[in-house]
Image (spheres, grey):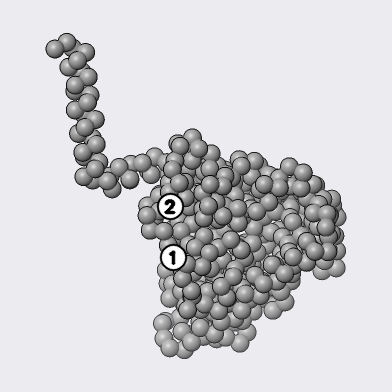
Amino acid sequence: MSNFQQKESATKKSQLYFKLFFKKYPAILFIIKWSLISSVLGVFIGSASAGFLVSLNWVTNFREEHLLIIALLPIAGLLIGLAYYYSGKDIEGGNNLIIDTIHHPKKTIPFKMAPYVYLGTIITHLFGGSAGREGTAIQMAGAIGEQFGKLFKLNKEDRITLLICSIAAGFGSVFGTPLAGAIFGLELFLIGRIRYNAIFPAFASAILADLVTNLWQVEHTHYAIDFVPKLSILPILYSVIAGCLFGLCAASFSKIIHFSTKLFKSRISYPPLRPFVGGIIVALAVLILGTTKYIGLGIPTIQQSFHEQLPAYDFAIKMMLTIITLSAGFKGGEVTPLFFIGATLGSALSLFIPLPTALLAGMGFVAVFAGATNTPLACILMAIELFGSECGVYVAIACVVSYLLSGEKGIYSSQRIEESKF
């Protein structure tokens, strides 16, 4: 037998050995495969989140130093509307498009979703819209992940897992909460059921993306709950009451934003004019209120809510401006505004609910979000990552009660109900 034949025979034996080994231990092949894919996603999505957060911080500071720029919000809205109407109709669905693609993997997510939503969100924040950042992070991540799905020639099931990983990586890296990000990706698209075969890839992607974002030396906002009462019957009952109010707030936000979106569409037939009109309303509101605390992300006010009791109208004004901004067609996300709404509502509730102000603010921070997005487990983990484990029981009570009372329909209309909440 020649040397070539010997080498070919040895190669075939090696291939057969590896096939038999991985057939006997499929978990090892699964871990290796998704570790490699998650590493690639982590590098690209984590870097995208880092760049987005730096840009967002810069435009926010620029706006606060040049307040007259808010007068141009209607023009900014018109430009965003024109861009999406004439060349972005296939990506208008945003987060719902990604959820729909998970349900129907035959659909594809164009890569242009990433630059479009990035620029749209930066413009929205630069000129004074009230919006968040999670929607942008998820859409950028979904568009990036979809390209690797094509590159790796993944099948239908693996594409679904890849999109879940992308959501987890985008959410986890933009907020600095990788554990919550992983569960958010698993909970988001299906109410009442978690896709367990995507747990390892989701956690790996979220953790690696967050690590990459941190390697870029991008800082995340920190919050602190300085005192948590000892677990007893009365504080638990107070947490249930607070959870009920947070759930009603979440339900109100979801219902009003869907109604407002339909109203803009029915009253203004030409889509680019919707953000133009919405921009006029928001800019006039800022002028009348005489403050910019209710536009943009509102991080300073969220932090303030953990230290002092805020007036009850703060959450209502932020809710109104956010609903107008997003339902009119500006880009961004709902989650950070929901943090603002929940934290300020919780802070105000400390006037008559005898729990520490910081604890109520923290409970509201995640509980309103849990009710509006139908992702209670992710929100509980987020609270533990952001505030510490001491508040875990109280936060869990508020999140679960809010989730139950917020209704079946949240802010994401493409979510499917696999199991009823009751």
Residue 267 left/right relative to 223: right
Q: Which residue lies at the image location 53% right of the left edge and 43% below the top edge?
A: 146
Q: Image quarter for residue 144?
A: top right
Q: Which residue lies at the image location 40% right of the left edge and 49% below the top edge?
A: 201
Label 2 Cα crowd, 10 Å radius (few <14 / some 14-19 / many 20+): many
Going by the numbered disc 1, the residue's amino acid type is Arg
Q: Residue 388, relative to residue 76: is it above or below? A: below
Mark 1, residue position: 193
Asked whether 215 or 80 is in front, the reply is 80
- Percent x, y of residue 50: 57, 45
Q: Residue 159, relative to residue 416: is it above or below? A: above
- Percent x, y of residue 301: 66, 66
State the SS at label 2: helix
Label 1 Cα crowd, 10 Å radius (few <14 / some 14-19 / many 20+): some
Mark 2, residue position: 202
- Percent x, y of residue 264: 79, 63
